[in-house]
Amino acid sequence: MNRFNQTDERRRDELIRIIEHSVEKLTLAELEALYYDMTTKSFIND
C-alpha cells in the first residue's frame, strides 16, 4: 500500500530534487556538518 497520495508523491519528489540540487553545491566541510547533524538526529543510520 502506498502511504502517499499522488499529490503528496509529487511534492515529495519536488522536495527531493530541490534538496539534491542544494546538497550538490555544499563544500566538504558543509557536507560533513550536515552528515553529523543528520546522524545525531537519526536521519542517517550507517
Image (spheres, rainbow, N blue to C red):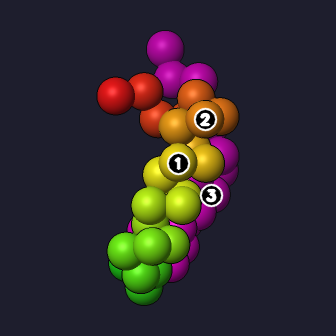
Q: State the SS at label 1.
A: helix
Q: Please name the residue shown 45% across and 80% down the image.
A: 26
Q: CA distance from mark 2 to mark 1?
A: 6 Å
Neighbor class of circle 1 (other Cα within 10 Å; few <14, some 14-19, many 20+) is few
Q: Which residue is mark 3?
A: 11
In this rendering, the answer to whether 7 lies above or below 30 is above
The quarter of the rendered structure image containing the C terminus is top left
Q: Which mark is residue 40?
A: 2
The amino acid on which the numbered mark 2 sits, given as a three-letter code, is Thr
Q: Which mark is residue 36?
A: 1
Q: State the SS at label 2.
A: helix
The amino acid on which the numbered mark 1 sits, given as a three-letter code, is Tyr
Marks 2 & 1, CB-CB < 8 Å contact:
yes
State which region is magenta.
1-23
Q: CA distance from mark 2 to mark 3?
A: 26 Å
In this rendering, the answer to whether 31 lies above or below 46 is below
Neighbor class of circle 3 (other Cα within 10 Å; few <14, some 14-19, many 20+) is few
N-terminal label among 2 and 3: 3
Residue 30 appears in view: yes
Residue 43 occupies which quadrant of the picture?
A: top right
x, y percentage for residue 16? 50, 60
The amino acid on which the numbered mark 3 sits, given as a three-letter code, is Arg
Neighbor class of circle 2 (other Cα within 10 Å; few <14, some 14-19, many 20+) is few
**Along the viewing direction, whichever of 41 and 14 lies nearer the viewer:** 41
Marks 3 & 1, CB-CB < 8 Å contact:
no
Q: Is residue 24 left or right of residue 17?
A: left
Q: State the SS at label 3.
A: helix
